[in-house]
Amino acid sequence: MTRRARLRLAALALLFAVSLLLAWRVLPRFGGVHGEASVIQASIPVSSPVQNQKDLPNVPLRSLAAQRNIHIGAAVQMEPFRSDATYRALLAKEFNNLIPENVMKFGHIQSERDRYDFVDADALVAFAQQHQMQVHGTALVWYRNLPKWLTDRPWTREELLLILRQHIYTVVSRFRGQVNSWDVVNESVSPDGESLRSSIWLEGIGPEYIGLAFRWAHEADPAARLFYNDYRGEGLGKKSDRIYQLLKELKQDNIPIHGVGLQMHVGIDEPPNFAELKTNMQRLNDLGLEVKITEMDVQIMDGIGSQADKLAAQASIYRNVLRVCLQVPNCTGLSTWGVADPFSWIRLVNHRPDSPLLFDDSYRRKPAYSAMQQILKSAD
Ligand code: XIL
């Protein structure tokens, strides 16, 4: 071999070694936003004594959740979704369940009679498909977010039955095979748990509107998972008893209902009772129902201590709720009501800058995020 050939061979070998090193240590840090755990973990050297936790690539919640057979979701708002690429990247990277926060509600989708507007809902469903996310639709029947044409004048019972059936058939069949689960009926029990909540549907149709809504949704998409969704019925007490009673009756009447959504809007000054949550989930399991945490947020402004204390208290609530979900077989997922703090509905409702979600104003991961990661990784 000539000297020149030897040199060329040595240069080639060096190039090869450098490429190997690059592929091993550097490239994984630039992994795509929606790589699943298997892909990311494959890039971590199996035994690397000098590497500490901080150097390891972050494993997204959705990947960890998939390994535990549950989903982690978020409610999505159209404004940041349309205008902010970082918001979309975060959504696709961390979550595998997408809930349109407002654009599948009656007032949005049928704001004029018989004229359905699916533009926003379609955009979210397409995004979910592109990023292998489930879609949870909300809500087919609710006492709020109704269009003016519906609330502005009285209707006969027959007319209301027709309006509701038409709405449910049109919306559910439009997304057949694309929306995995629906909140068919939202917040139908009164806040004190004494009775059914007064609404256009209860006054105009009677309590049977609930069962009818489930039947129609099931006819429109027999494969969709159908949910009853409500708030402050997470633990034990009058309201959760009333919800339980309602669900039990629906099951006895052979109404096609598959699950119940526990919203979980809470605060560090009023944490949920985790033991009660578990008992409640278990009794719902015994009714044959799936359970999901559907709208979790944890307000911190009314807590005590430093900001760090408050964030730690918040993390502990997220951790414990997720732990309970992992402990009961019928709990299939946890979704937060928003992707990041700046878009939380709590800020609008309370007119103050609370921070109830997993990512802060700069989309940085909060202690609550790490707590969720840790519990998803742990065996207990
Ligand atoms: C809220 C949205 O977050 C707001 O943007 C909207 O103005 C009102 O509705 N329970 C529910 C959700 O079931 O649909 C609500 O969402 C929050 C409370």
Image (spheres, rainbow, N blue to C red):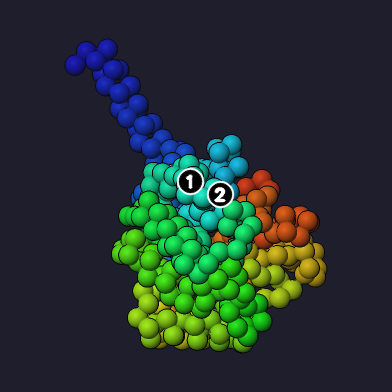
| Amino acid beneath label 1 | Arg
Height in image: 68 above or below 343? below
Specify whether tag 2 is near ligand 1 (CB below 8 Å). Answer: no
Q: Position of residue 42 (x, y in %)?
A: 35, 50
Residue located beneath label 1 in the image: 115
SS under mark 1: loop
- SS for dot 2: loop
Which residue lies most toward the right here? 305
- Identity of the residue drawn at 52% across and 77% down: 206
* The one of 330 and 256 positioned closer to us in this rendering: 256
Q: Residue 156, labelled with which disc?
A: none
Q: Residue type at mark 2? A: Ser
Name the residue: 48% across, 63% down. Answer: 159
Q: Is residue 31 visible?
A: no
Q: CA distance from mark 1 to mark 2?
A: 7 Å
Judged left or right of residue 31, residue 364 is: right
Does residue 15 appear to the left or right of 265 in the view shown? left
Question: Is the residue marked by circle 2 packed among few (<14), some (14-19), or many (20+) residues within 10 Å?
Answer: some
**Residue hosting label 2:** 111
